[in-house]
Amino acid sequence: MKLLGKIALVTGGSQGLGKAIALKLAENGADIAVVYVGPPEPAQETCREIEAMGRKAKAYVCDVRDEQAVEATVEAVRADLGKVDILVNNAGITRDTLMVSMKDEDYDMVLDINLKGAFHMIRACYRDFMRKRYGKIINISSIAGLIGNAGQVNYAASKAGLIGMSKSVARELAGRNVCCNCIAPGFIETAMTKDIGEDNPLLKQVPMKRMGKAEDVANVALFLALPESDYITGETIRVDGGLAI
């Protein structure tokens, strides 16, 4: 229980990778703020599962594109749970199509949620992390941000931007003992990848010949949240079965 006494805020925490990360951090002692949009039931179920472990959990609905909503949510988390020690920026969407037919609104929405949303969350926690001289920022990027992917110009741009932003934040906060790192998942079994068939040509390039599981990503997030990773910052750790080698 190395995270006992720590508070983790996880965006997109009601399902998929976010839920897996929230549960993994809770298993190791953290209390969790589950930030979500959409129907409340999945977020409430995630909270119930966390509470069944004996940890505190509370759900907060928040559109990460909205600067004021983000600020209000982080303040509410501090009021309810006392602080934020670990920030996991996992909220993300896709709007896939070839660039020639991509609409501006689909490009903008992906960038606003995947990249600007993380910017809003980090900025809302920034001064508090500086004052405490402690914090863990874990941004969920993607191998698409490293190698690109046809039909995902907007998504790849947002995830590549997240890597660059993380490196800059890491440099700004390193002197305050705050770590900022990225995880770049490959093909992971989630709702976002449910339509990927075994005949997908990119999936066939995975050296391990299979998709990963959400827990594979959650395990890396746990490591980056633990004291064992206190001298690691500005890194991007791939969880992709070797796809981006």
Image (cartoon, rainbow, N blue to C red):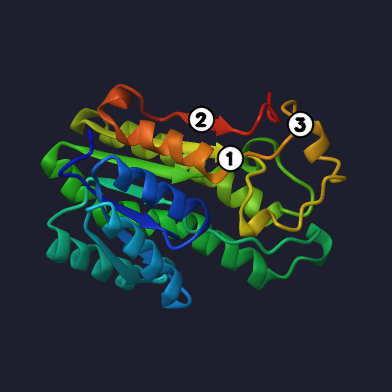
Q: Are marks 2 and 1 in contact (CB under 8 Å)?
A: no
Which residue: 57% across, 47% down? 159
Tell me what residue is drawn at x 80 percent, y 32 percent: 205
Residue ID for mark 3: 209
The earlier-in-sequence mark between 2 and 1 is 1
Relative vertical location of residue 241 with respect to residue 163 in this rendering, above or below = above
Amino acid type, callout 1: Pro
**Is tag 3's residue or tag 2's residue first in the polypeptide sequence?**
3
User: Of helix, strand and loop, which one carries label 1?
Assistant: strand
Task: Specify which label sits upstream in the sequence, 3 or 1.
Answer: 1
Which amino acid lies under the numbered mark 3 shown in the image of this protein? Lys
Say which residue label 1 marks: 185
Quadrant for residue 41, please give it. bottom left
The CA span between labels 2 and 1 is 8 Å
Q: Residues within 10 Å of mark 1 (few under 14, many from 20)?
A: many
Who's the residue at 28% across and 55% down the image? 32
Query: Disc number at residue 237?
Result: 2
Position of the C terminus, as image quadrant, is top right
Image coords of residue 150 (percent x, y): 79, 48
Marks 3 and 2, Cα distance to the nearest angstrom? Answer: 19 Å
